Amino acid sequence: MSEGLAGRGEFDAVVIRTDYTDERAWQAVVATLPQHVHVVDAPSWSGASVDDVLTATRDADDLAVVFLADPTTMRSAPPALLALTTLTPEDCENDEDYTHLTKSGPTFRTTPPGIPDIHANLSLGNLGFEEYAAWAGESPDGVYRSA
């Protein structure tokens, strides 16, 4: 299932399409994506779960977060992609550290303009996933929007 991940630029965020039910909705999502996004549009990802994506991206270098275009993304306006941390308990010093870093959960929703901000800051370690998840949680609709 790692199809489509090869060829990603070193600084590119990754958007993986997991919903193949509406091509028109997908094209609308693609039209909103910012520059420097590596789009994975391979039917082998159809219906992939969060766990499937984590397993498939585990060995990807410098990938702190992936963004999924799932059924919710395709039905929301503006599109709200699912941001998924690639952090696992094995990446942390202990379970307490992992719990702290994912206290709002391993996912949250973001609009496409938030992708570069989230990706860059997580990659550089300027901000943590938990901070973005908390900001998304403070939004009335639970979606992070870049300032």
Image: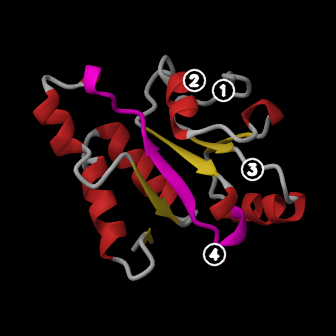
Q: How far apart are marks 3 and 1 (CA)?
A: 17 Å
Image spot of residue 87 (x, y percent): 34, 32
Image spot of residue 101 (x, y percent): 21, 43
Residue labelled with disc 4: 78
Q: Are marks 1 and 2 in contact (CB under 8 Å)?
A: yes
Horizontal arrangement in the rendering, residue 1 relative to residue 113 (left or right): right
Helix, strand or loop under label 3: loop
Residue labelled with disc 3: 19
Horizontal arrangement in the rendering, residue 141 relative to residue 111 (left or right): left
Residue labelled with disc 2: 56
Horizontal arrangement in the rendering, residue 36 relative to residue 114 (left or right): right
Q: Do the residues labelled 4 and 2 touch (CB within 8 Å)?
A: no
Start-end of magenta stretch? 74-90
Q: Which mark is residue 5?
A: 1
User: Which marked residue is nearer to the observer: mark 4 or mark 2?
Assistant: 2
Image spot of residue 12 (x, y percent): 56, 39
Q: How far apart are marks 2 and 3 (CA)?
A: 17 Å
Q: Distance between the residues labelled 4 and 2?
A: 28 Å
Mark 2: few/some/many CA within 10 Å (<14, 14-19, 20+): some
Rendered view: 110 above or below 147: above
User: Which marked residue is nearer to the observer: mark 3 or mark 4?
Assistant: 3
Q: Distance between the residues labelled 1 and 2?
A: 9 Å
Q: Which three-letter amino acid code belongs to the residue tagged 2? A: Ala
Q: Distance between the residues labelled 1 and 4?
A: 25 Å
